[in-house]
Image (tube, rainbow, N blue to C red):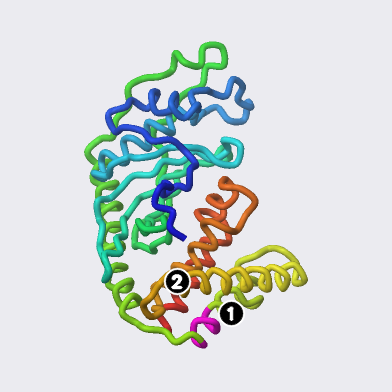
Amino acid sequence: MDTTNQKPWHEVGVDVDANFSSREMLYKAKLDWEVSKIPSQRPKSYGNQETMRFFKGFFEAGKADIETIGSLDGARILWGLARLNQDFTLTGEDKVKGYVLLASRNESREKIEIQFIAVREHCHNMLPIASKAKPHIKNIFRRSFNPTFPFLNQKPQTFDDEMNKKVAGMVTLGREAISSFAADAQQLADKKIATPISWHYMFNVFQPETLKKISTVGEKEVTELAEKNTKLAIETLSQVSEQQPYEMTAWSLLNAVTYIIDHRLGSNQDSRLRQAWFGSNAKLKTRALELALAL
């Protein structure tokens, strides 16, 4: 399960430099296009340029180092990922990095989604971290859309002092959440788990009762999905046991689950990332963390 050469975003998106302009970032990601027609009932437009400019301003205000941008679901979702430099190392030189994710959907470009994520360096498993920060923020970089000359509307826009302070406060809450999670992660890493308990844990994570709470498919489909995922989890856990000479821990159990979700479930990388960040699999990871802490 060593995926050291992969990126945290699982080969979706492109590397960018913080010194790039928003337009240069979009160009590298092949997202430097604009919608040429806006319905009359939407007099305000939030194009890729405005969205990326907001991402860049947010990361700068939060003193986070932007690393990657990209799109999902046929460019319906635009996202940016920045490192918080809020890292920690567990027993055995197991390093975990903190990130902040911003995402904007086509149907609601005014609302920017915010997530804080812990990424395990060894296998690039991702885990959403709950924080006291609001999960959304308003994109203030909107523009009046001129359908004839859309690019004439681009005016320099920056965060004012109030917005800088607001963003800095939100990112501080995210860093605090990552720091708090570090203590939980070490607790999991220190907790040795017997093999029978590990199987029981996997069953609890992927049982139909759990999936029903986070899925919208029918009961038959949920049961089939639970059986499939549990089998996959056991196979992955067996591989971990063979590769690791030391005892199984609650931390390795949790990472077996996140590995399955991030690297095995879904038909392609785009689908995996969407589900891991915004879909039912994000809730499944949270459930897995709760069960691991309860062991």
Disc 1, SS: helix
Which quarter of the figure is the C terminus placed in? Answer: bottom left
Q: Is residue 245 magenta?
A: no
Front residue (pair 124, 97)? 124
Judge from the rendering whether residue 94 lies leftward or rightward of residue 33; answer left or right: left
Q: Where is residue 125 in the image (x, y as percent from the top left)?
A: 43, 59
Which of the 4 image quadrants contains residue 37?
Answer: top right
Judge from the rendering whether residue 261 lies leftward or rightward of residue 80; answer left or right: right
Q: Where is residue 136 in the image (x, y as percent from the top left)?
A: 43, 50
Judge from the rendering whether residue 226 lies leftward or rightward of residue 86; answer left or right: right
- Which residue in the rendered view is the most extreme toward the right? 220
Residue sitting at 49 percent across and 72 percent down? Answer: 288
Residue sitting at 56 percent across and 11 percent down? Answer: 148
- Residue, disc 2: 254
Residue sitting at 50 percent across and 68 percent down? Answer: 257
Among numbered discs 2 and 1, the one appearing first in the sequence: 1
Disc 1 marks which amino acid? Phe
Mostly what secondary structure, the magenta segment? helix
Q: Where is residue 255 in the image (x, y as percent from the top left)?
A: 44, 67
Magenta stretch, residue numbers: 196-201
Disc 2 marks which amino acid? Leu
Front residue (pair 111, 9)? 9
Q: In this view, does 49 lie above or below 196?
A: above
Disc 2, SS: helix
Judge from the rendering whether residue 76 lies leftward or rightward of residue 97; answer left or right: right
For residue 203, the mark is: 1
